[in-house]
Image: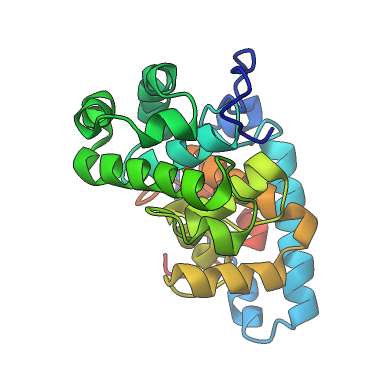
Amino acid sequence: MRSSPNNPRPKSKKISVERPSKAAQSKPLATKPNRPQSLKRSRSKETSGQLKLRAATIVAILKETYPEAKCSLDARNPFELLIATILSAQCTDKRVNMVTPALFKDFPTPREMASADPSKIEELIRSTGFYKNKAKNILRCSQEIIKKHNGTVPASMEELSSLAGVGRKTANVVLGNAFGIPGMVVDTHVTRISNLLGLAKGDDAVKLEHQLREVIVEKDWIIFSHLLIDHGRHICIARRPQCGSCALLKLCPRLGL
Ligand code: SF4
């Protein structure tokens, strides 16, 4: 699925469709559940092995709860996913999916995007917010892909994160979802829920990424963020987590609540 300026656009195919399972559509919390005190007390004594086992159990439960979990940005190749992820900063995936069809219709490849009129890009992405900065980054990023990578989106963290507007989070999204290379994406849902679950601590994205890589087995790195994002959207909602309906309640110390 590598992008190439010479190849015709593949037939329209969404990388993903966000669709919560029935199990995810639980009833709202009627009463505040008891905090699992024993778990909270014993957490300080939790060994690395026990933490990894608890993490694996959490991932297994989330996989059952959200069998459809996947990247919710629509993209047909690494270039589209890269641009869509840049656009998703401070914006919902749903909104990004509304603007990208027109953007990629006019500028389907890095080469066409690289020579676009900046004001045309701005106009097409305006509703995603911060559109002037995003347009500047999209333009520069596309120009760098042409200049340094011969028009092909690179498939390494080092090369991706050196592109304009691309940080570790965006690079991990592209590595994992476009190239199948394990990457741990840390966004606001992952940060918040990992802390509540006691799987990682703090709000520094790079430190959290490294902590989670230690706790979660590598084969689950890509799916892990999608699972937590679905859980954050449907049950562990910011400011009003539905703990009484949560399949993870017995495994969650609910740190910080
Ligand atoms: S909803 Fe409650 S029990 Fe479930 S993960 Fe969030 S804080 Fe933990």
User: Which residue occupies 65% across, 51% down?
Assistant: 155
Q: Residue furthest bottom?
A: 45
- The answer to whether residue 66 shows anywhere in this view is yes
Q: Quadrant of residue 8?
A: top right
Residue 42 drawn at (x, y percent): 66, 81
x, y (%) of residue 156? 64, 58
- Closer to us: 40 or 199: 199
Residue 194 against residue 120 in the figure, above or below: below
What is the x, y in percent for residue 190? 51, 56
**Quadrant, the N terminus:** top right
179 lies left or right of 254: right
Q: How many marks?
A: 0
* Residue 247 visible: no
* Image quadrant in which you'd find residue 21: top right
Query: In the rendered image of this protein, does residue 185 appear above or below residue 78?
Result: below
Q: Residue furthest top?
A: 11
In this rendering, the answer to whether 20 lies above or below 153 is: above
67 relative position to 161: left or right: right
Is residue 252 or residue 179 the one in the foreground?
179
Q: In the displayed structure, does residue 212 sit left or right of residue 28?
A: right
Q: Quadrant of the C terminus?
A: bottom left
Q: What residue is rendered at 60% in x and 44% in y? A: 226
Which residue is located at x 62 percent, y 28 percent? Answer: 15
Q: In this orientation, which residue lies closer to the viewer: 195 or 214?
A: 214
**Residue 195 in the image: x percent, y percent?**
50, 67
At horizontal 60% and vertical 73% (from top left) the residue drawn is: 210
- Colouring chosen for the image of the structure: rainbow
